[in-house]
Amino acid sequence: MRQGVAHPFRHGVAARLWRNPAFRCYFAGRVLSTCGSAVSPVALAFAVLHIGGGVSGLGVVLAASVGPQILLLMLGGVLADRLPRGRVLVVSQLVAGIAQLTCAGLVLGGSAGVWQLAVLAAVGGATSAFFTPAAQGVLPQIVAEDELREANALLRLVMNVAKVAGPAVGGLVVVLVGPGWAIAFDGLSFLVSAVVLAFLRVPLGQVRPSRLAADLGDGWREFVSRRWLWIMVGQGSACVLAWLVGFQLLGPVYAASSPSGPAGYGLMASGFAAGLVSGSLVALLWKPQRAAVTVCCGLGSMALPLAAMTAQAPLPVVVAAMAVTGVGMDMSIVSWSAHVQRTIPNELQARMSSFSTLGQLLPVPVGYLLAGPLADRFGVTAVLGGCVCLILAASTVPMLLAEIRVLGLPADTWGPAGRPVPVPVPAG
């Protein structure tokens, strides 16, 4: 087999993963939660628009969902490196489930306002600050190092399958019975996920008696010592901002002004999820040597559907562009997750994840709050065009650096502090 390609069933990796009870439990909990979360965004967006919140109101709700996550991510990373990570996952899912069921009750009862939805979105965002770093750190604890790439790819494959039908179903439910029932389904999925994850047995080796401030400082020093890591986080910060503003905020507004309405936005999201599924399959069959180049190309593909919306392309063209973006993004996520999990010590995994996520999300609330007024003044298509330009620029600049282009090559190309040593970049 030629270099750079890995068969998904080499040495029975997939079979070994499925025989691992801890992986099965983790896998089931994550997939159950994803089933509900795939339906909810369409419902929440059109719930805000239905009560007259408009693009600015939706921006406030989305900003509220990200703000607490930003404020609490560093604490979440430290706690996930100090406490049993399985317990952190369970508590996070329970709180998220209660928040979503409360939101559903308000929407179904006809008493929901923008500020109430924003507060509950903030609670959900706060739970993500603890769940995300803990989930990142659990996988290297329950599977072998040589199984990490396949574990990430298999997990994302099934989660992405759930995301294909979820948005389309969510759009249909909004049209038929309103958004409240879709949000309620998401809340129930969080609670069932919490029950399943309660049976997860994670080794307790990461529990350490130390001070929060010391752990936070140590984590920050480790983060900034890896130049490759914060460069890529900076890239992600720009691309994630443009993508979330373009797709999550302006996408529903774009769809609401077209004949397709909520169903059209659901199809766009389903096309994106279908691309994610295809990307997971590609990631199982092909193992690129250079993780950062894969990430840059994947992030660059995010400009395609936003450009199609800017050009007022027909819905099938936008859906197809979403699918291409999904392939690129999932390849990026699988490659980058496996690279970070292999190169960062386990006791630092959650903190590195929290710093990385924090860097990517930091400008998002401001973007959400500014995009609404900008869209009102200059038009939705103008703001979408700006998002396209930002993604293209941010996805290109890091590839100008040799140390970024070689990221992901075999371990003997690496020097101290996680920095690549100068080596010729192989062809192919």
Image (cartoon, rainbow, N blue to C red):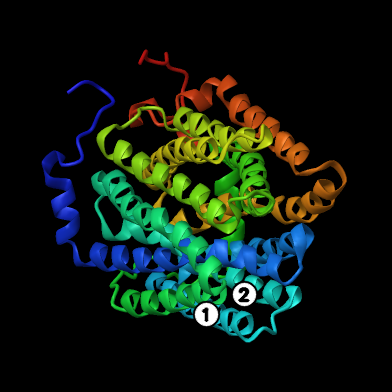
Q: Position of residue 326 (x, y in %)?
A: 45, 41
Q: Residue at x 28, y 77 (%)?
A: 199
Q: Position of residue 265 (x, y in %)?
A: 56, 52
* Amino acid at the residue labelled 2: Val
> As rendered, which of 148 and 352 lies closer to the eye?
148
Identity of the residue furthest to the front in this view: 259
Task: Give the x, y percent position of residue 286.
Answer: 29, 32
> Quick one: label 1, few (<14), some, or many (20+) residues within 10 Å?
some
Are the residues tagged 2 and 1 within 8 Å (C-beta)?
A: yes
The image quarter containing residue 41 is: bottom right
Where, quadrant-wise, is the C terminus in this rendering? top left
16 relative position to 411: left or right: left
Q: Residue 418: x, y in percent? A: 47, 36
Give the side of residue 233 with respect to residue 18, left or right.
right
**Disc 1 designates what residue?**
95
Q: Quadrant of residue 99?
A: bottom right
Q: Judge whether 191 appears above or below 144 on screen.
A: below
Q: Name the residue carrying label 2.
A: 123
Residue 351 in view in this figure: yes
- Mark yes or no: residue 346 visible: no
Q: Point out the residue furthest to the right here.
A: 377
Q: Residue at x 26, y 55 (%)?
A: 143
